[in-house]
Image (spheres, grey):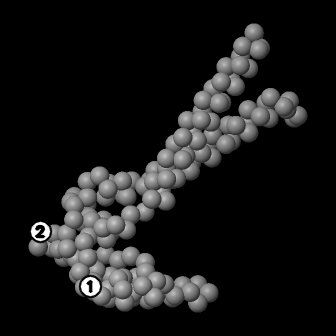
C-alpha cells in the first residue's frame, strides 16, 4: 500500500521516537548505578590486592586492579580495568579511596573513576525523546487541522 510523503514522514518520526525511547530506557538503566554512587555514595579506605589478567577473544589480554575495603567490619572486594603500563603507578601507593553505596557496599568503585558515558547518553536521549515527541505532536496537530 503506497503512502503519501506526509504519512511516510510521520511514520519515520514515530520510528525515531521509538528508537530514542528504547535507547533512553537502556541508558537510564545503565546510569542509575553511577547516579546513585554520585548522589548517595560514601567513602572508605581500601587496599590494593594486585592485578589480575584476563584473556579475551582473539588473544586480547585485559588487566583488572583488585582491591578490598571494609564497611562496619565486613570486607568487600572490587576491581577496575587498568592498562599494564599503568599498573605499577596505580598500585604503588597500596591504598585507595573507594566510593560505595551504604545500602549495598557490593556496588563500589574507586573514587574519581566515575563513568560519565551512560549519564551523558541518558541526558542526550532524554532531550532527543522530548524533541521528537514535541515534533511528532506538532506534526499530528497540523495534520488534524489540515484535514478539517
Instruction: Name the side, left or right, on which 143 lies relative to 75.
Output: right
Q: Which mark is residue 72?
A: 2
Q: Is residue 96 visible?
A: yes
Q: SS at mark 1? A: loop
The residue shown at (28%, 80%) is 67
Residue 62's spot in the image, x, y percent? 49, 84
Residue 33 left/right relative to 131: left
Q: Quadrant of the C terminus?
A: top right
Q: Is residue 104 visible?
A: no
**Dot label at residue 48:** none
Task: Please give the name of the residue rendered at 86% of the width and 30% of the height, measured from the top-left corner.
Answer: 4
Q: Is residue 68 left or right of residue 124?
A: left
Q: Is residue 82 above or below residue 139?
A: below
Residue at (37%, 58%) from the top-left corner? 34
Observer-nearest residue: 37 or 19? Answer: 37
Residue on which disc 1 sits: 93
- The residue lying toward the viewer, choosing from 25 and 43, is 43
Q: Secondary structure at mark 2?
A: loop
Q: Please report whichever mark, 1 or 2, sits nearer to the chain's N-terminal start.
A: 2
Q: Quadrant of residue 68?
A: bottom left
Amino acid at each position: 500500500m503506497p503512502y503519501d510523503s506526509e504519512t511516510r514522514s510521520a511514520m519515520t518520526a514515530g520510528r525515531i521516537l521509538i528508537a530514542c525511547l528504547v535507547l533512553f530506557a537502556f541508558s537510564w538503566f545503565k546510569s542509575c548505578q553511577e547516579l546513585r554512587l554520585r548522589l548517595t555514595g560514601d567513602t572508605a579506605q581500601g587496599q590494593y590486592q594486585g592485578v589480575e589478567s584476563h584473556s579475551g577473544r582473539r588473544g586480547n589480554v585485559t588487566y583488572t586492579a583488585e582491591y578490598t575495603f571494609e564497611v562496619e567490619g565486613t570486607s568487600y572486594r572490587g576491581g577496575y580495568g587498568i592498562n599494564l603500563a599503568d599498573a605499577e603507578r596505580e598500585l604503588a601507593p597500596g591504598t585507595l579511596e573507594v566510593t560505595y553505596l551504604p545500602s549495598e557496599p557490593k556496588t563500589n568503585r574507586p573514587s574519581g573513576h566515575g563513568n560519565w558515558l551512560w549519564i551523558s547518553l541518558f541526558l542526550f536521549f532524554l532531550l532527543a525523546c522530548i524533541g521528537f515527541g514535541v515534533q511528532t505532536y506538532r506534526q499530528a496537530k497540523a495534520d488534524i487541522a489540515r484535514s478539517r
